[in-house]
Image (spheres, rainbow, N blue to C red):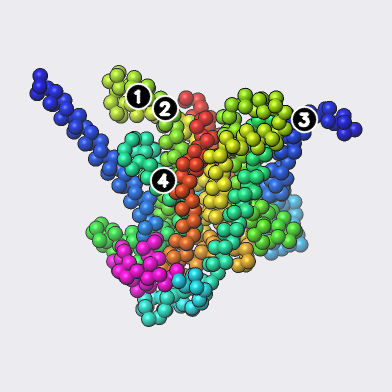
Amino acid sequence: MRAATDDGRRAMIAKRWGRGLLISAFSALLVIYVAGPVAWLVSSSLQSEADITAVPPNWLPPKVTFGNFEAIFSNTTREVTYETRRQGDPATGRFLPSGAENLLPALWNSFTVGLWVAILNVVVSITAAYAIAVIHFKGRQAALYTILATRVIPDIALIVPLFLVMRNLDLVNTRFALVVTYLAVTVPFTIFILISYFEQIPRDLYRAARADGCSHVQALRHVYLPLSLPALVASVMFAFLTSWNEFIFALILTQNIASQTLPIVISGFVMDFTTSFSFVNAAGVIAIVPPVVLAMMFERYIVSGLTAGAVKG
Amino acid sequence: MLERLGRQFGYDERSAALLVFPVFAVLMVVAVYPIVYSFYTSLFDIVLTRPWRRPFVGFGNYARIFADPQFWTAVQRTTVYTVVTVSITTVMALFVALLLNEAFPGRRLLSALILLPWATPSIVNGLMWKWIYDPGYGLLNGILVQLGWIEKYIVWLGDPDKTLFMIANAAIWKQMPLAAILLLVSMKSISNDLYRAATVDGANVFQRFLHVTLPALKPGLMLVLVYETMISIRHFDLFLIMTQGGPGDASYTLSWQIYVETFRNLKFGIGAALSYVLALATFILSYLFIRGFGSKA
């Protein structure tokens, strides 16, 4: 009898250990898969050109150098040629591309465009989502489907007409053109998120507010907005990240540094094969930090917001 | 007059119109107009190197596309890339969601960490993997040689047989987290009673997965498949930054063909028609997925 329970307990313990081992192994693999490539990006941004072109590669910088970051933030220009890079001699300088000084203005452009998109996106989406989700007006389904259908056409198809529109309005090479364009990308999705959120709010609250004499704008302000804070945070984050990461529209709509965003300037470095690897990686690290920090900080909101529509199935 | 309008359309209608107006104004300019104009363009033989003559050709551009062998190459490349990306992303996401559905210390930290690829800009994703694959100094070659799995450094992106898969790998890295999160949410909505009942009936882990988890995951899986297919079939950024359609035409996908026809050959008519073919393909595929899953459920 005692032996039997002992066996049972041992089996239980073995099973629990097995489960723990399996979960640890899987978790470790996942961490390496997700963070490994980025860790290598960061590691190579901190190496000198000689260290970065070593064979076999240095997993960690043998000697940490912030030269690339200094160059980006202190606005110096130094020429680099294919030959000097291949020599891999630290004495030939830090291998900076001639456009290095463009990174700082591009960073600023990315921030301002992202902020404007985040604000305007949520402002125009809130009212439309409220109208479609709450007010039972004729044609609300049609309004929703029209908004969502605009996302079916591939972005690349919209670029030529958009470019012509912006040129006619004399807006090419302005950040304003990017802000307006990005709204076309973010607004449909934001409205979708907000509608599914608004519909979960009990309708009795709306009826009570209206019975108390609230107008629609007041009902939106005093009932719906305070109750949908997570969805609003998610929308702001989503819009900023979309704007920060967007590439193809900016590639066509902006051709000078007054309006170019970070991805455009960085892609220029990547396709110029004379640019130092460590410098390109440093530029990549700078572009990756703001969205990653925001995503980690607001992880809970983003996940609940992104999946708000999905839960209903 | 105004009064009569006011009576015909109640307060609700008027408020709704006012509240929806800003969105429609914006979308009109940056989405609806370009979409319509783009279709209009696709009916003309517009070549920018010959701006004075732009004859109406009806669906002639579409006919020319389907007769172009380059188009069928692009279809083939796009299909391979999409099938590989979507299937591997979905399977990996399923495993990650199963892991994150368990209760264990560090689970919260892990689910925040997997947002890292999702938040990474696609251009940085491209440069990062291009550097990892680098034929001279990349990490991938370094690791494989140090492990003794390969003798010499391999040219990964420059090899026509490998390049599509290498790009797909970079795309999977970025797309897997969101797919995992979407699946995790549908998993969380499965009632624990179902598992308990299955356990009482003597079902083991795999049987529980097969008969409880998987059927309940259908809506989530469908969403992931539709979303990932839509993203992959029209993906552009990685192709521009990693291979530019090459080597040769090894990564010449449909979105790359649209870019080349429009911005390099300046054939706006053909480019617009290609975009509409791609949009239609996306639409049909999504519909088929939804229908297929709907009938089985």
Which x, y percent locates residue A6? 12, 26
According to the image, label 4 marks what residue?
Answer: B112
Does the magenta run of residues contain A116? no
Report the mark closest to the observer, 4 or 2. Answer: 4
Circles 2 and 3 in contact, beta carbons < 8 Å: no
- Among the two numbered marks 1 and 3 on one chain, the one whose residue lies closer to the N terminus: 3
According to the image, label 3 marks what residue?
Answer: B11
According to the image, label 1 marks what residue?
Answer: B195
The stretch in magenta equals A41-69
Drawn side of residue A116 relative to residue B17, left or right: left
Report the mark closest to the observer, 4 or 1. Answer: 4
Q: Chain of mark 3?
A: B
Task: State whether residue A298 is above or below residue B130.
Answer: above
Label 4 vs label 3: CA separation?
45 Å
Q: Chain of mark 2?
A: B
Mark 4 neighbour class, 10 Å CA radius: few under 14, some 14 to 19, many 20 or more: some
Q: Chain of mark 1?
A: B
**Front one among A299 and B75:** A299
